[in-house]
Image (cartoon, rainbow, N blue to C red):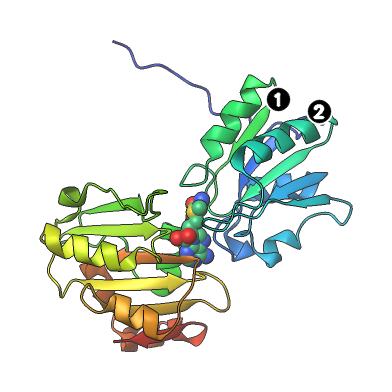
Amino acid sequence: MNPSLYNPPPHKQTFKAGEVALVGAGPGDPDLLTLQAYRFIKQAEVVIYDRLVSQEVMALLPDSCERVYVGKKQADHRVPQEGINQLLVDHAKRDKKVLRLKGGDPFVFGRGGEEALFLLANNVACHIVPGMTAASACTSYAGIPLTHRQVAQSCTFITGNVQDNGALDLPWHTLNDQKQTVVFYMGIKSLPIITEQLINAGRSENTPAALIRKGTRSDQQVIKGTLSNLDELVTRHNIKPPSLIIIGDVVDTFTDDSLKNLGYLKATESVTK
Ligand SMILES: C[S@@+](CC[C@H](N)C(=O)[O-])C[C@H]1O[C@@H](n2cnc3c(N)ncnc32)[C@H](O)[C@@H]1O
């Protein structure tokens, strides 16, 4: 069978009235925006944005742009997803250039697919603009390579968000390869379950583990430990979301001294062990 050919999406077209641009704002540092994202941000007439979009990115919007905050903390959805979908359609039908600005990448744990499907079902044209996802950007800013020759040959992004019944039902047996990096999004609340289940699945208690809070921002924090003590370190330092958890030998690729030499620790509070 011949492979199907798809043209790339028409991002280079102008942002027209009555359209929605679903744009990834990256993890915080505005320098990590794509040029496409920047172009849509500069033309927006209405922005519908989440809690994870940084103030520095918001500051790039035109002064005249109408701002609609739809929140979203775990278990505190200021506007439920159905309401957000409808808001996008309503503003587009007002003939506005509507920017849906989301932290990271809209298609990585961002519900961007649901919003795009709803827009299409309502005959609203939609641009989809990728953003730098937290796993990639935050680890770079913390000096942790996601893969490293002979240390980690694969990398998995997974959600640590618990279900409504409090359970965290994940395929733990697929996460026990010592040469695999595992990145948990939304995992801080379930950190004790995560570390326990990974050890039960066969990962060594001494596997290096890190937590990055507010990655790429001026107040980024990095905590490094092991599977057996990360939870205790996080509790001791009273770390809150938004945080990423990185499990795997890559965490220890660079020593604190080499990170200092690379200039890393200047803007990063690193608490180790
Ligand atoms: C709903 S998910 C959104 C992910 C986003 N779409 C992305 O691609 O990065 C929210 C989670 O992403 C992670 N996250 C996003 N930005 C972060 C940051 N600057 N520092 C640390 N973690 C971040 C946290 O795990 C947070 O709980």
Q: Is residue 175 above or below residue 43?
A: below
Quarter residue 98 falls in? top right
Residue assigned mark 1 = 124
Percent across and percent down for residue 111 are 52, 41
> Quarter of the image containing the C terminus?
bottom left
Q: Residue at x 52, y 70 (%)?
A: 214
Is residue 194 or residue 103 the one in the foreground? 194
Percent across and percent down for residue 246 are 32, 65
Q: Secondary structure at mark 2?
A: helix
> Quarter of the image containing the N terminus?
top left
Confirm whether residue 151 shows in the render: no
Q: Secondary structure at mark 1?
A: loop
Q: Residue at x 60, y 52 (%)?
A: 77
Percent across and percent down for residue 116 are 59, 31
CB under 8 Å between discs 2 and 1 = yes
Comes first in the chain, label 2 or label 1: 2
Confirm whether residue 82 shows in the render: yes
Quarter residue 207 falls in? bottom left
Q: Residue at x 46, y 46 (%)?
A: 108
Is 218 on the left or on the right of 240, as rendered? right
Q: Tag 1: Cα neighbours inside 10 Å, few (<14), some, or many (≥20)?
A: some
| Amino acid type of the residue tagged 2 in the rendering | Lys
Q: Is residue 56 above or below residue 119?
A: below
Is 172 on the left or on the right of 66, as rendered? left
Q: Residue at x 27, y 62 (%)?
A: 194
Percent across and percent down for residue 137 are 46, 62
* Gap in angstroms between the C-alphas marked 2 and 1: 8 Å
Q: Tag 2: Cα neighbours inside 10 Å, few (<14), some, or many (≥20)?
A: some
| Amino acid type of the residue tagged 1 in the rendering | Val
Q: Is residue 44 above or below residue 128?
A: below
Residue assigned mark 2 = 93
